[in-house]
Amino acid sequence: MNAAADTAGGTPILRAESVTKRFSGLVSVDQVSFEMRKNEILGLIGPNGAGKTTLVNMISGTLRPNEGALYFEGQPIDALAPYKRAHLGICRTFQVMKPFPGMSVLENVTVGALFGRDGGETAMAKARESARDWLDFTGLSHRIDARADSLGGPDRKRLEFAKALAMGPKLLLLDEVMAGLNSVEVEEVIELIKKMRERGVTILVIEHVIKAIRSLSDRVLVLHHGQKIAEGDPAAVLEDPQVVEAYLGRRRH
Ligand SMILES: Nc1ncnc2c1ncn2[C@@H]1O[C@H](COP(=O)(O)OP(=O)(O)OP(=O)(O)O)[C@@H](O)[C@H]1O
Ligand SMILES: [Mg+2]
């Protein structure tokens, strides 16, 4: 029997099968397997250097696994360039944000709308209109004509979200979008992520802010030295002695 058919909602939107990535002999992601169901929020945690960003890079296509395979909606994706994966609906934000600096906020998000899921089929006027909608959604309408590089931290995060959302993601990969935000701003971003999910987006959240992981995640996956050491219900995983030892306990010091 096909195990995938057993999961609620049919074929998983994403399936990783024993994915491994090595850099000059060192294993950064070590035979990691997991699935994501449509419309779920999966929290991905682990200490610095655990392999979280490397895993996201393999899903979005900037890196290819040395071993193993990734499937999106049942189709193998490892041979596809990042832009082709974006056309399928796999979009990501970057841990180090990359706005187009000389361009306005509106232009940045319009680029997202032009090069996202519809893959070059979107007319400029429609793309701009969609960009305005997403800037409204993310609370950045008042900075629409500002240069992207003039934005402060929280507004840059909103811009990253608006750009990613304008691409029409089915699967959104968020790599530490809360880093450097204060607790009020963290709450705002949590609400924004919840709103995205209500719109039908499936979301992978990498975050060191455990409060956010707890409040957002349907399930949590923990990486340590590139290996999956726990996966499942957030409360149970965050209490798991191995996880506390590897990660949470250490961060208390
Ligand atoms: N391009 C690369 N070349 C060589 N080594 C790399 C490269 N990218 C990542 N690594 C190594 O792979 C390991 C995992 O790094 P990764 O950035 O995936 O960790 P992370 O879990 O995202 O950590 P953080 O929480 O600090 O962002 C680290 O040892 C890192 O030095
Ligand atoms: Mg990282």
Image (cartoon, rainbow, N blue to C red):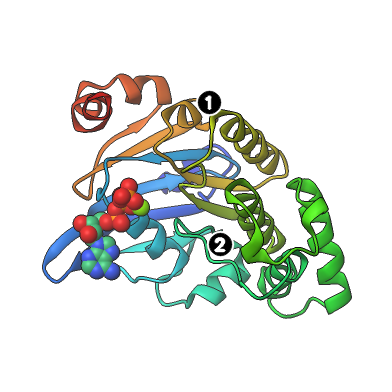
Q: Secondary structure at mark 1?
A: helix
- Report the mark closest to the observer, 1 or 2: 1
Visible in this render: residue 59?
yes
- In the rendered picture of this protein, how many numbered marks are placed on residues? 2
Asked whether 110 or 143 is in front, the reply is 143
Q: Position of residue 237 (x, y in %)?
A: 33, 25
Q: Quadrant of the C terminus?
A: top left
Distance (Cα) linking label 1 and label 2:
24 Å
Q: Position of residue 75 (x, y in %)?
A: 49, 66
Residue at left offset 80%, top offset 60%: 144
Ligand 1 is found in which quarter of the picture? bottom left
Placement of 132 over or under 243, stated as above or below: below
Q: Is residue 139 left or right of residue 13?
A: right
**Vertical placement of 187 versus 40: above or below?**
above
Tell me the kind of residue under disc 2.
Answer: Ile
**Which residue bears the numbered disc 2?**
90
**Residue 43: x %, y % from top left:** 44, 38
> Which of the 4 image quadrants contains residue 89?
bottom right
Horizontal side of 175 relative to 190 (left or right) equals left
Residue 9: x, y in percent? 59, 41
Q: Which element type, helix, strand or loop, lies under badge 2?
A: strand
Q: Amino acid at mark 1?
A: Ser
**Residue position marked by numbered label 1 in the rendering:** 215
